[in-house]
């Protein structure tokens, strides 16, 4: 004989994000304590500001060692917080590393204020693990950086360790 068990939601969410616990009453009237999931211990976001004035006349803005050693990098997102100048012929931006200068941009990123990237812009779906801290590169497309423009980059990563 086959028995079919039907379940319904115990809470409004299947996953509760936070740092504490919550109690739920199940269908049999028992009360159980559920632990919330604290994502800040799993996913780290480091934000850096790259200013064109620091790279005036060059073709690459570098965040030295920005990609953390031994961490899995989920991706790099970016936002233009000051529009970039085009006097050096600059037409777009690409974000990557030394092995793939386009890893996190599958098309040229626009230079205009408010332009943002997300994971839909990634050209590489792999989750890189860098054995040593690695430089994050923002490449100039079509020309060189001049003295105008600011890009905020966010490096999303996680580090898995054996629990103590």
Image (cartoon, rainbow, N blue to C red):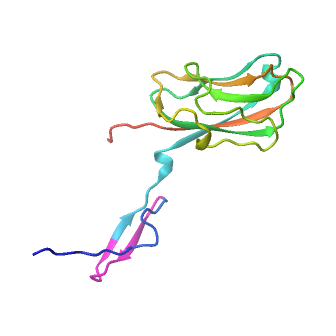
Most foreground residue, 105 or 52 = 105
Q: Position of residue 162 (x, y in %)?
A: 33, 38
Query: In the image, is residue 45 above or below residue 19?
Result: above
Task: Determine the residue positioned at 62% across, 39% down.
Answer: 121
Q: Position of residue 50 (x, y in %)?
A: 73, 30
Task: Determine the residue positioned at 53% across, 41% down.
Answer: 44
Task: Determine the residue positioned at 63% across, 33% down.
Answer: 106
Residue 146 occupies quadrant = top right
Most foreground residue, 109 or 32 = 109
Seen as rendered, the residue at the extreme right is: 87
Most foreground residue, 41 or 156 = 156
Seen as rendered, the residue at the extreme left is: 1
Number of disc labels: 0
Q: Which residues are magenta?
A: 19-32
Quadrant (top left/top right/bottom left/bottom right) for the C terminus:
top left
Residue 118 occupies quadrant = top right
Q: Is residue 104 magenta?
A: no
Q: Position of residue 141 (x, y in %)?
A: 75, 24
- Direction from residue 102 to residue 69 in the image, left or right: left
Q: Position of residue 103 (x, y in %)?
A: 58, 29
Query: In the image, is residue 66 above or below residue 24?
Result: above
Quadrant (top left/top right/bottom left/bottom right) for the N terminus:
bottom left
């Amino acid at each position: 004989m086959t028995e079919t068990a039907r379940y319904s939601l115990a809470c409004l969410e299947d996953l509760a994000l936070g740092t504490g616990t919550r109690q739920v009453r199940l269908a049999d009237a028992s009360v159980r304590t559920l632990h919330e999931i604290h994502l800040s211990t799993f996913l780290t976001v480091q934000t850096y500001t790259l200013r064109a004035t620091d790279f005036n006349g060059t073709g690459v803005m570098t965040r030295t060692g920005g990609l953390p050693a031994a961490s899995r990098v989920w991706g790099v997102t970016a936002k233009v917080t000051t529009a970039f100048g085009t006097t050096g012929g600059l037409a777009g931006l690409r974000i990557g590393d030394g092995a793939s200068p386009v890893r996190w941009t599958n098309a040229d990123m626009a230079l205009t204020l408010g332009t943002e990237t997300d994971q839909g812009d990634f050209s590489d779906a792999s989750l890189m693990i860098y054995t040593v801290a690695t430089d994050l590169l923002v490449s100039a497309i079509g020309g060189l950086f001049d003295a105008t423009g600011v890009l905020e980059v966010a490096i999303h990563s996680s580090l898995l360790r054996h629990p103590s």
